[in-house]
Amino acid sequence: TNKPNIVLDVSGVNKSFGGLRALTNVNLQVEEGKVHAIIGPNGAGKSTLLNVCIGRIKPDNGHVVFNGETLDRHQPHEINQLGVSRVFQTPEIFADLNLLENVMIPAFAKRDGAFTFNAIRAVSAEKELREEAEEILHDVGLYERRTHLAGSLSRGDKRRLELGMCLIQKPKLLLLDEPTAGMARHDTNMTIELLKRIKARGMTKVIIEHDMHVVFSLADKISVLAQGTVIAEGLPEEVRGNPRVKEAYLGE
Ligand code: ADP
Ligand code: MG
């Protein structure tokens, strides 16, 4: 039998913030090469789950296993070095550096294990990396503006820049928290096309998404989170008609 390779295995994860239960016994299995969407209403715990996966938030209990390695005691930069990159809900870019420099920095950070000032200084020396960064800026549609300061970009363009900053790390697993949030329809469609091209390269992705058009354009599998619990999972066509899912969205 051909058992699928599980790249990310979340099992029995609980997380409370004070008296608020953000995640209750969450299980999630992400297969290699697939796009796994996590959907659910605002406050469902989607971002918290993503932050648990990258080590920014430690779960109260339960485990996250990436590529066979238990991540319980790993720091975020160590998880990044293992091959996990992420796009946050709020873009985290270097506003005072230009786009090219922004895309180059994560490559150094992955190598050195942190975002250091050495990394920023070393940027100007690396010609080969510069070419790679230019190619990525092409891919994300920002090449023409490569010498502009990142801080000057619109919110949607910052999101695409951050995606480029992930791609240069050539991650095994890419986690995206609402990558089209704040984008107009044209930009959203451009991002869908870009994510489809990445999919063709076989990179495993977990995508948190509110826009159902994006979800059904990209996802191989969907997990639905509501009030910190996975209430449904399966193929897009299975999840689409699920009455529990419809109900969870009604309260929005
Ligand atoms: P989603 O991304 O699905 O909208 P979140 O994971 O951001 O949901 O939040 C889930 C719940 O946990 C919300 O009720 C939110 O207010 C709460 N929460 C998230 N992060 C924190 C935090 N650092 N401290 C306290 N409460 C938090
Ligand atoms: Mg969120």
Image: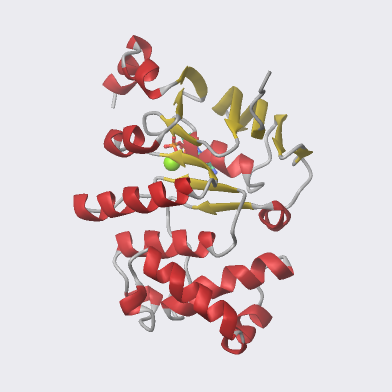
Looking at the picture, tell me which residue is in the foreground, 122 or 151: 122
Say whether residue 115 is visible. no
Q: Position of residue 23 (x, y in %)?
A: 56, 27
Q: Residue furthest left?
A: 185
Q: How is the image coloured?
A: secondary structure
Q: Residue furthest top?
A: 243
Q: Total number of numbered labels?
A: 0
Q: Position of residue 203 (x, y in %)?
A: 54, 47
Left-right relation of 184 to 62: left
In the rendered image, which quarter is residue 171 located in?
bottom right
State the residue at coordinates (49%, 73%).
133
Reply above or below: 141 against 217.
below
Viewport quadrant of the C terminus? top left
Say whether residue 230 is visible. yes
In the rendered image, which quarter is residue 80 located in?
bottom right
Reply above or below: 141 against 145.
above
State the residue at coordinates (41%, 70%).
137
Reply above or below: 70 against 198.
above
Q: Position of residue 244 (x, y in %)?
A: 37, 12
Left-right relation of 243 to 71: left
